[in-house]
Image: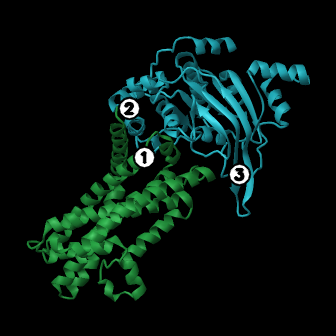
Chain colours: A cyan, B green
Amino acid sequence: MTTVIEQQQTAAPVPMRTAAAETTVRRRQLDDAFPAVVAEHVTKRFIVGRKRKSVLAVSDVSLRIRRGEIYGVLGANGSGKSTLIRLMSTLLTLDAGRVEVFGHDIVREEMAVKQVINRVSVDAAFFKKLSPHENLIYAARLYGLDARVARAEAIRILARLGIGEKRLGRPLEQMSRGMQQKVAIARALLTSPALLLLDEPTTGLDPRSKLDVQAFIEELRDTHDSTIVLTTHDLDEAERLCDRIAVLNDGAVVVEDTPEGLKAMVAERHGAAPTMESVFMTFTGRSLDDDTNADESDSDDD
Amino acid sequence: MTLMARELKASYAFVERNFHLTKRYWGWEVAWLVYSVAGALAISLIGRSEGSNRLLLVLVIGAIFWNFLSLVFEFIAETVQWERWEGTLEYTLMAPVRRYAQLLGSAVYAIVYGLIHTAVVLGVLALFFQLDLSHANFATVLTFIGLGSMSFIGIGIAAAVLPLMYVERGAQMVFVIQSVLLLVSGVYYPITVLPGWMQVIAHVSPATYVIDGVRRGVIEGTPISQLVGDIWPLVLMGIILIPLGMWTFGRAERYAKRTGKLKRVG
């Protein structure tokens, strides 16, 4: 897997099939010298409840995400996954530490960061009365894309995800949750983000939709030159899709490696079965079914 | 693409999106229009019952132009609340769009929407009461609508921070501001009937000057040149309130990002 990543880093950029021309130019301008994401000692606290209790959502996290890889963030509910994604998305401010996206500091160069990222959240955030077409054109204009180019591109992406052109005109509220999530992914891809943040994109989907979305992420890995950060609490999904995985527990990264590396680590060092479940149990001391009871509902929805 | 062209394109995104939302919620639009017409008629009929044509015109103008100003205010002040309700607030604030471009788009749509809505109400009331508008000075009316819009955009932007900062009570606070403006601005009565402390508030409400200016333009045909006393406070308020609103919004956005308040929906 490492070899593939290194090849992606050193090879000429893969032609972008989903990009509008100007976005392509913008992407080409990203300096290859920088990793996709560098996070150093990132910390985020929230004050919650009437007693104004301080909750540590992300604790001294340092990450280095390479270009072109799918980087998984695995953790139970409330472990800080979504907070970490929101920090990278400029939707939260840092309490301590720093984050760079393709060499752009997310505090000092917020607009430059916004231009190269997009995010798919666990809940497909749309104007539900509007059609997919209306929502996608809105998104395209926000990112400075030509509406006609965006429409053609949206049709192509949605067709790949199994949504026909005739569905584009109906309100999103008439679509299933799975279809809405596919439209959300199409919307994110429309802007050709150099960094795609997928925050539990398959949570709550029916098995068929989940497989469709996972297959599409795999296809992205093979055909698209985006870097993807994927948060999930689905062990199989993390193993299947991610080049490297960081396990997050109580806001801190407790281990990071390739799926194979993690499994080998628990087998060799801890004598546990070489499975992702063992990895998770070993490094967090609990199963994924154990929701943290931290009352940080304000800080994290993962 | 130049920065200006890109920002204008982003502004247009909000105009187009709001148009699509209006179209999709057409049933509610009809309902609000009927409610606005019924409300304006009900208030104006008080003037007819008193047998005073001047009182009738005072009430008609108050009802119609307060309708316009409150629509502009609501559209902008509820921008955040609307997106929070739809669950799109984070998506919009994550986009590479400067806040002034977003608020410009919202403001342009609010004014166009408000003008169309108000024109319909005015048309119905004019037919219903057979209003004689032959003496009206429409240049004065348009000037006050334009200047009043600027001030209300500024207040609306500042008020929009309330739903950003107070997730559950913000929309209620916006409603309270709107109610206070209605009470003190002489929409249906002269501000001289208000207690002294309320008259002080009335003098810092742009609606006071807009309604007064429009009344004088419609009823007496007064030209703009004779209404400087109403115009300069509006110009001053527009110059102060829009940048102040933008600054306040920026501060509130930072606060929401620090405290995690962008996330909440519903």
Kind of residue sitting beneath label 3: Glu
Q: CA distance from mark 1 to mark 2?
A: 23 Å
Q: Secondary structure under badge 2? A: loop
Kind of residue sitting beneath label 2: Leu
What chain does badge 1 belong to?
A: A
Q: Nearer the viewer, mark 1 or mark 2?
A: 2
The residue where tag 3 is placed is A296
Q: CA distance from mark 3 to mark 1?
A: 31 Å
Q: Quadrant of residue A201?
A: top right
Mark found first going from the N terminus, 1 or 2: 1
Mark found first going from the N terminus, 3 or 1: 1
What chain does badge 2 belong to?
A: A
Tell whether label 2 touches label 1 (CB within 8 Å): no
Q: CA distance from mark 2 to mark 3?
A: 37 Å
Kind of residue sitting beneath label 1: Lys
Asked if residue A72 lies left or right of residue A225, the reply is right
Tell whether label 3 touches label 2 (CB within 8 Å): no
Q: Secondary structure under badge 3? A: loop
Q: Would you place residue B244 above or below residue B84 in this image? A: below
Q: Secondary structure under badge 1? A: loop
Residue A246 in the image: state x and y as whole percent. 73, 30
Q: Quadrant of the N terminus of chain A?
A: top right
Mark found first going from the N terminus, 2 or 3: 2
Give neighbour class at mark 1: few <14, some 14-19, many 20+ (Cα, 10 Å): some
Q: Nearer the viewer, mark 3 or mark 1?
A: 3
The residue where tag 1 is placed is A129
Q: Would you place residue A91 above or below residue B115 in this image? A: above
Could you tell me which residue is drawn at 44 percent across and 48 percent down? B99
What chain does badge 3 belong to?
A: A
Could you tell me which residue is drawn at 17 percent across and 88 percent down? B51
